[in-house]
Image (cartoon, grey):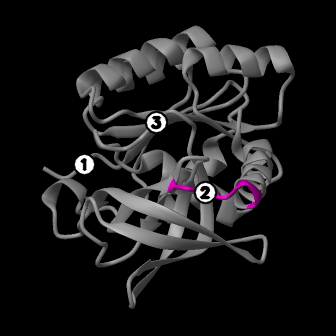
Amino acid sequence: MTAPRCALVIDDPKGGLGSLTLRLIRLGIDCFYAKESAEGWLLAQQERNRIRVVVVTPDVDANLVAKILAVLRGADAADLRSAIVIGACPGDATRTRLRDAGVDWALWEPFDESALRMILATAMAPVVHEEPRRTPRLPTTLLGRAFRGLHRKDGVVSSLSSEGAFLEMPHPYAEGTQLTLEIDVDGVALVTKAEVRYTRERGSSAFADYPAGMGVSFRDLAPAARERLERFLAEQNRRFGL
């Protein structure tokens, strides 16, 4: 069965996410739209196997978000759902409440279509058992090159953490492959050894709606490269982090 691709959008009384829902639909994402919290709670229970990500405003009841995520994540513990808060950046206390409720990412106004597409793609990507999760991944659109001996494969780094990355590419290297990875970060190639931890094949029924690619973990990252990576991740966290 194809993995679910729907978003549950829970709006506030001001209707702040109405136009955003239309933007998501134009991006090819099916949406369940709830005008208020009670409707969102009902939709989460009724459609929990189809909902991949929950989109809320900063004014949402954090306790409700926690309840909804518990329902969605209980549907399949190996296939975690995500939550994004979108809107005007609130104060520290509100961000802390949302973070404690399980919200993964934020997209603060103003933002463009590229940022919206980037964070939705990362939030809706399937999670597999082999994927490391000791540090948070952040959405990116960086160019990457993977080398195995004289063989080279190019891809797009769609998510990145201090420990690894996911590269979208049509024919990824096999799980367990040792390779050299180059990622273009701020105009400079970050070079590191890496190992393929898992792959997503386009032909697989489980991932039919998702780009093929491979998740890799970094090995022997040089201090200067790690410093550059951490600076870039800090910038991305200010952009998308809660």
Q: Is residue 202 visible?
A: yes
Residue sitting at the far right: 91
Q: Residues within 10 Å of mark 2 (few under 14, many from 20)?
A: some
Q: What type is the residue that disc 1 sits on? A: Ala
Q: Residue at the location (26% across, 32% down)? A: 78
Location of residue 89 by image quarter? top right
Q: CA distance from mark 3 to mark 1?
A: 20 Å
Helix, strand or loop at disc 1?
Answer: loop
Residue, disc 1 = 3
Whether label 3 touches label 2, CB < 8 Å: no
Residue, disc 2 = 221
Q: Indicate which disc residue 185 carries.
A: none
Q: Is residue 61 visible?
A: no
Quick one: quadrant of the C terminus? top right
Write the start and end of the magenta stretch as one range: 219-224
- 33 in the magenta segment: no
Give the foreground label among 1 and 2: 2
